[in-house]
Image: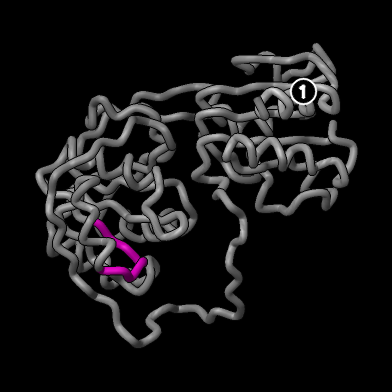
Amino acid sequence: MASLVFIEFDKNIINGYTKQSATLASSNSNLVIGVSDYKNEVYLKTLGEYGFDKVYMVNDFSNEDKIFNIIRDENIQTIFSSNSNNIKEISSKISINFNFPILNNVINLESINKPKTSIFSGKAEAEIQIDTDKCIFILNKNLIESKKFNKSTKVVNLVTSVNENNYLVLEKVDNKEDISLLNAEIVVSAGRGLKGPENWEMIENLAKKLNAATACSKPVSDAGWRPHHEHVGQTGIKISPQIYFAIGISGAIQHLAGVNSSKNIIVINSDPEAPFFKSADYGIVGDAFEVVPELLKALDY
């Protein structure tokens, strides 16, 4: 049986989602096929370390014709991928054209025929019975630890010089952030308890010391204190870091829906009745303007 993994990158290195997907594909398939829109053949040939037997280079994930041909030629049965918007779009097209069911928010794949998914914004789990050999698994982050393999990877170049996209790029802007929020293992997030955008320096300093990404609640991004791409929650980015710091965030259900699959949640809030404490693994009742500077001092030792 062959499995397909869409390869995604963080600063030209495959990200944690992809490593996890490749490990799961290797556990359930004889052949692991990758599709990459990153066009560095030398680097792609090293991906046998993560379980890839063959990698196809394409212009873009939106090039459905090439991806459909790969699925036919390689007789793909299962597809493993992240929850990114690009992958959601092509997965929907694959599902329609090849009759692949899609399982979103997969949180357990110990049994590939009875996976578990997160439902109702993370408040419940569902065990799904799969009665077909074909399926697309959209995985939550940190579902398993990725493994190392000793494979040689064949790279097939399907890149063309012609722009095959069905859209026109009006502007391309590089993301200057040090760590991608979606892929960060540690996230330092803050809310209206910071009182204004001028107080975010201590949040950024804490993130730098922890090698973490920064995030914020919806009211903060709506107020223009922080950019909208940092908004995590039900209507923002959904993340699953190893550690999530919630500083000055009350913990409304809409915010929790985007972060409740974090491995560890640490809440800092001056209100001991803040709802977030009910979901916290660790909590500090205190003023962020007193607690965070003490954390920064402790990290300097």
Q: Which residue is mark 1?
A: 294
Q: Nearer the viewer, residue 259 or 41?
A: 41
- Name the spot of residue 94 as percent of width and height, x first: 31, 58
The quarter holding residue 154 reads bottom left
Label 1, residues with CA under 10 Å away: few <14, some 14-19, many ≥20:
few
Way the structure is coloured: one colour
In the rendering, at what x and y percent does residue 111 appear?
Answer: 23, 26
Where's the C terminus, which quadrant? top right
Residue at 72% across / 29% down in the picture?
296
Describe residue 162's horizontal placement relative to residue 172 as left or right: left
Q: Is residue 114 above or below residue 138?
A: above
* Front-most of residues 189 and 95: 189
Q: Position of residue 207 (x, y in %)?
A: 65, 39
Residue 22, image quadrant: top left
Q: Residue 92 colored magenta?
A: no
Magenta-highlighted residues: 34-41
Q: Based on the displayed image, in which of its 4 quarters is residue 123 positioned?
A: top right
Task: Name the amino acid, label 1.
Answer: Glu
Is 235 situated left or right of 119 in this image? right
Q: Position of residue 51 (x, y in %)?
A: 20, 46
Q: Nearer the viewer, residue 138 or 179?
A: 179
| SS under mark 1 | helix
Residue at 56% x, 31% y is: 121
13 sits left or right of 265 in the view: left
